Amino acid sequence: MHYGYHIGIDEIGNWLPLILPIVILHLILFSVALWDLLKRNQSREYKWMWGMIIVLINMIGPILYFIFGRRHSIDAPTSSKPASKKVWKS
């Protein structure tokens, strides 16, 4: 005697058109976010933190990285030259 709900092959086939695009989107976001993180010139602590967020928080982690994590490196100055100061003469 079997108690509970048993999912058959027919029922999985009904859900497949909904689940498959979500799984593909997740795999694309996951792999692109990790690759982008590894290619960036950032500190090791920064990469570890965002790597854990990307891996442990499914679907939301890569999205958070693209919204907030990449902003950190974009705001950083790209040149090592100090900004020139304007001197006003009166």
Image (spheres, rainbow, N blue to C red):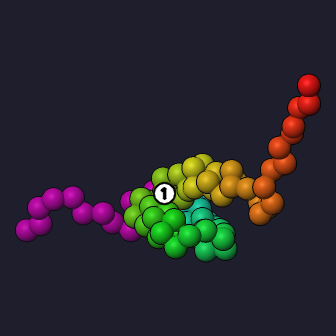
- Quadrant the C terminus occupies: top right
Towards the viewer: 52 or 76: 76
For residue 59, side relative to residue 73 (left or right): left
For residue 79, side relative to residue 54 (left or right): right
For residue 29, side relative to residue 78 (left or right): left
Q: Horizontal and vertical percent for residue 44? A: 52, 73
Q: Quadrant of residue 70?
A: bottom right
Does any portion of residue 75 appear in the rendered image? yes
Towards the viewer: 19 or 45: 45
Q: Residues within 10 Å of mark 1 (few under 14, many from 20)?
A: many
Q: Looking at the image, which residue is at 53% across and 51% down?
A: 64
Kindly identify which residue carries mark 1: 61
In the image, the segment drawn in magenta is 1-17
Q: Looking at the image, which residue is at 55% across and 66% down?
A: 30
Q: Looking at the image, which residue is at 73% across and 56% down?
A: 77
For residue 4, side relative to residue 73 (left or right): left
Q: Horizontal and vertical percent for residue 46? A: 51, 65
- The residue lying furthest to the top in this view is 90
